[in-house]
Image (cartoon, helix red, strand yellow):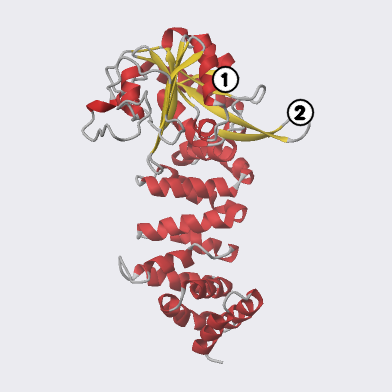
Amino acid sequence: MDQDELIAELERAGHDKELRARAVRRLAEPGAAAVPGLLAALTTVDRYVMFGLQEALRLIGPAAFDATVAARARAEKVPDWWELGHVLRGFDERCLPQYVAALSHPMGEIRTQALGGLEKLGEAAAPAVADVLPFLDDPDSYTRYVAEKAVRAMGPRVCPELRAVRRNGPAKLRGHALTALATVAGEDGLDARDRLALERLVRIKLADDIPSSLPDHRWLAVRGAAYEGLFDVMGLHDRRPCTIAMGLSAMGHDIARVPGPDGTERVAYRVFVTPELDGWRLVYADTPLWEMHWDVDDLLRRLSAACGEAQFFFQDTHSDSMVWSVAVDGAVRRSYWRYGDPEWEGEPLDWEEPLSAGPAFDPEDDHDPNATLATDAGYAAIALSLDPTGVCEGMPMSGHGWLAVTEKGVGHGPFTGALHI
């Protein structure tokens, strides 16, 4: 049966796993001789058939890898660029030498696809970790992101080699090896000397920290003069000084799963408390606030009882959701939730404009009696405390930021991910 007939057989197999597997094996049987036809057919078939052709190419192995790279390199934008990239990421550990060689290819996309393929290999790609290290500092942010995913997928088995690079060089890879250790194993992966060096670096950087723009997706705010009470109220432990950059990068990796006293898994979160900015401390707890780990109204009541005043802001551009709420001395005074029922709670604050002042106001519409024009979380933040995106050099700042965790005795060691200091 020729190749066209086998591809037709694969198409007829539909989603029948046994028939598909048989057709794929037969397509791969001729080895390297089958590769040109399989590559040429990638864009002529339905997507589920294309995945079968990809599997046949994977079974063929290195010869198919080399041909796929050559096909992708023929032009900057070949018609089947997406399909070829998908194939490149799908080879098995037999192609580890080819993946390493592709990391030096002159075409950036091929280098990135090779990093993606190493990520899919997972622990089997561990022998290539030294070749991936330079990409952790690549000028292109997406390439850095894919390289970090590849190193993370290799897992803790790469730690001994990375520690050896830290101690013995080559010198040009020492910094990248430290980043990789933090990515794979967190602080627990560092030896005592590296931990001390990082502590010294943080102390130095704290002296030069300057205000910079902050995220505006979800955050809490308390007055800086009375912020100390928030650590007990939120159940935060093991706090340590941090720069603004360090705190923000920690939010990208703010979950650690650790064994509990009874052997069951428990989840700890990292929380970032900013320095005092124009009289306010902002609190970022990205994952627990997103997952509603706390009942927000209850948390605001307890925070405001301890700190005098507490605010919560949330905005999601995808769902167009907006939430803002303010509590004073243990009671929620005013809140708005775009999808709430009712949307408004509490009496309008003195800075809110009445709904009737808006250009779209229709007195015949059914409005909440306490509704106003203050429906935007960013606008409310400006009126109540400060706009995170407006934080900039020159804004009054005092103290330093803090990183803390939500579980006692966990510490910062289990949290993976390199922190920007």
Name the amino acid, label 1: Met
Residue 126 visible in rendering? yes
From this view, report whether residue 68 is shown above or below residue 167: below
Question: Of all residues shown, which one is farthest toward the left?
Answer: 359
Question: Of all residues shown, which one is farthest toward the right?
Answer: 262
**Left or right side of 350 for 244:** right
Q: Quadrant of the N terminus?
A: bottom right
Nearer to us in this view, 337 or 72? 337
- Identify the residue under disc 2: 261
Image coordinates for residue 86, horizontal then vertical, percent: 46, 65
Q: What element carries label 2?
A: loop
**Left or right side of 390 for 359:** left
From this view, report whether residue 67 is shown above or below residue 116: below
Q: Is mark 1 on a helix, strand or loop?
A: loop
Q: Residues within 10 Å of mark 1 (few under 14, many from 20)?
A: some
Q: Residue at x 39, y 48 (%)?
A: 142
Name the N-terminal-most of marks 2 and 1. Answer: 1
Name the amino acid, label 2: Pro
Nearer to us in this view, 4 or 219? 219
Residue 421 visible in rendering? no
Question: Of all residues shown, which one is farthest toward the front?
Answer: 364
- Identify the residue under disc 1: 234
Q: Nearer the viewer, mark 2 or mark 1?
A: 1
Nearer to us in this view, 125 or 383? 383
**Numbered mark located on residue 98 in the image:** none
Image coordinates for residue 104, horizontal then vertical, percent: 41, 57
How far apart marks 2 and 1 lie (CA) works out to: 21 Å
Image coordinates for residue 345, horizontal then vertical, percent: 44, 23
